Image (cartoon, rainbow, N blue to C red):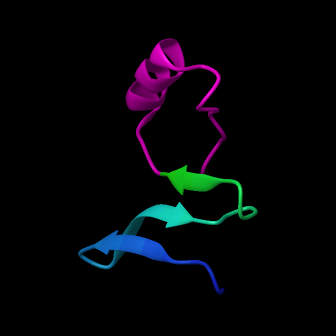
Amino acid sequence: MSHPDFRVDGKIFATLGYPDSDHAVVMRSADQQEGFLAEMPRAFSAVKGA
């Protein structure tokens, strides 16, 4: 894949430019997602992970 990602101990925790150049992905727990969504619902959306 051609988009940059950020890793700690070989695990990705954030990706830029995915799924397109206007977006990024930040991996958070369900509880953390809930907090982000409550504070800034227009900036964040939750998706189910694998």
Q: Relative to 4, is 48 on the left or the right?
A: right
Q: Residue at x 38, y 29 (%)?
A: 32
Q: Is residue 18 above or below residue 7?
A: above
Q: Relative to 38, is 18 on the left or the right?
A: right
Residue 21 in picture, x, y percent from top left: 71, 64
Q: Quadrant of residue 1?
A: bottom right
Residue 2 in picture, x, y percent from top left: 64, 86
Q: Residue at x 53, y 21 (%)?
A: 37
Q: Is residue 37 above or below residue 28?
A: above
Q: Quadrant of residue 17?
A: bottom right
Q: Residue at x 66, y 40 (%)?
A: 47
Q: Relative to 47, is 12 on the left or the right?
A: left
In the orientation shown, which residue stands out farthest toward the right? 20
In the orientation shown, which residue stands out farthest toward the bottom? 2
Q: Is residue 33 magenta?
A: yes
Quadrant location, the C terminus: bottom right
How many numbered circles are shown? 0
5, 12: nearer the viewer: 5
Q: Is residue 37 above or below residue 43?
A: above
33, 48: nearer the viewer: 33
Q: Is residue 41 magenta?
A: yes
In the orientation shown, which residue stands out farthest toward the top? 38
Q: Quadrant of residue 11?
A: bottom left
Q: Is residue 49 above or below residue 46?
A: below
For residue 13, say whether it is visible.
yes
For residue 50, say whether it is visible.
no
Residue 16 in picture, x, y percent from top left: 55, 65
In the orientation shown, which residue stands out farthest toward the left? 9
Q: Residue at x 60, y 78 (%)?
A: 3
What residue range appears in magenta? Answer: 27-50
